[in-house]
Image: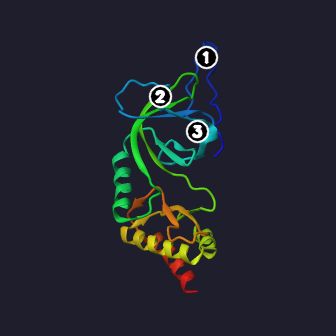
Amino acid sequence: MSAEQPTEQPTEQRAAGIVQPRAFNPLRDDIRWDRGPLTRVPDPNRAGVIVFTPQDSAQTSREGLGVWRKSNQAYKLFGTTNQFTRITNDIQKAKDNGLPYANASTSEGLIYTYENPPNFRTLQGFAVIATWYDAPWRFFSGQGNWQSAFSVIVGAATHNSLLGMQRALRLAVQLKVSDPQGFIDPTTQSTNSIQFIDIHYGSDVVAQAMLEIVNKQLSG
């Protein structure tokens, strides 16, 4: 995704020195995460506030403001609390049923965005915080024409890695995990080889298709 182009201001507004606010862009603007009560006084310089720069931006998001990385953790930030309960419950369901969930957790807090620095805008939102996975972990997704990329990962996997995928995907089918995505370590000798992120429920179609690819590799 490319950075947004500035909107041309009407001549009379330019002449009057009126500056139109920009939309937040994670590839251009800083953002800060302030975990804690939503009703407290905003303070972007409070101890414990996490500062994200455009260099920390890891991924855009259709659901939220974006995904940022700090050390070995990923932070997906949301500018409202509309989805907080649903996402919290979805993660808890995965945890309760033994589905690998990347150690994800949710927290409410204040978010400060810097579209027009040094001024900031305060949002009452929340964060999903999960483990960040680097190589040899490989990202997988069930969106689009996913079969070829998924088959490449599966084809290079160790036997134990495949057993871990099989076990987790069987559970994903049982729980009807829709649009399964996350990370796989095809090199590991452990069966803890797959982690799911952005977990949603509703349809087991893609999870079942992924399981069939893994089963075929194991039986080959």
Query: Left of 67 or right of it: where is 4?
Result: right
Tag 2, which secondary structure? loop
Residue 207, position as x, y percentages in the image: 46, 70
**Measured along the vertical axis of the image, is residue 110 above or below residue 136?**
above
Residue placed most toward the observer, 12 or 77:
77
Mark 1 or mark 2: name the one nearer the start of the chain: 1
Mark 3 or mark 1: name the one nearer the start of the chain: 1
Select label 3 or label 2 by which is in front.
2
Q: CA distance from mark 3 to mark 1?
A: 30 Å
* Residue under the point 45% across and 55% down: 103
Label of residue 26 in the image: 3
Select label 3 or label 1 by which is in front.
3
Three-letter code for the amino acid on which mark 2 is drawn: Ala
Q: CA distance from mark 3 to mark 2?
A: 23 Å
Image quarter hosting the C terminus? bottom right
The local crowd at label 3, few if under 14, some if 14 to 19, many if 20 or more residues have their Cα within 10 Å, is many
Tag 3, which secondary structure? loop
Residue 106, position as x, y percentages in the image: 40, 46
Mark 3 or mark 2: name the one nearer the start of the chain: 3
Residue 186, position as x, y percentages in the image: 60, 69
* Residue under the point 61% across and 14% down: 17
Three-letter code for the amino acid on which mark 3 is drawn: Pro
**Measured along the vertical axis of the image, is residue 149 above or below residue 28?**
below
The local crowd at label 1, few if under 14, some if 14 to 19, many if 20 or more residues have their Cα within 10 Å, is few
* Residue under the point 43% across and 58% down: 199
Label of residue 47 in the image: 2
Three-letter code for the amino acid on which mark 1 is drawn: Glu
The local crowd at label 2, few if under 14, some if 14 to 19, many if 20 or more residues have their Cα within 10 Å, is few
The residue that mark 1 highlights is 12
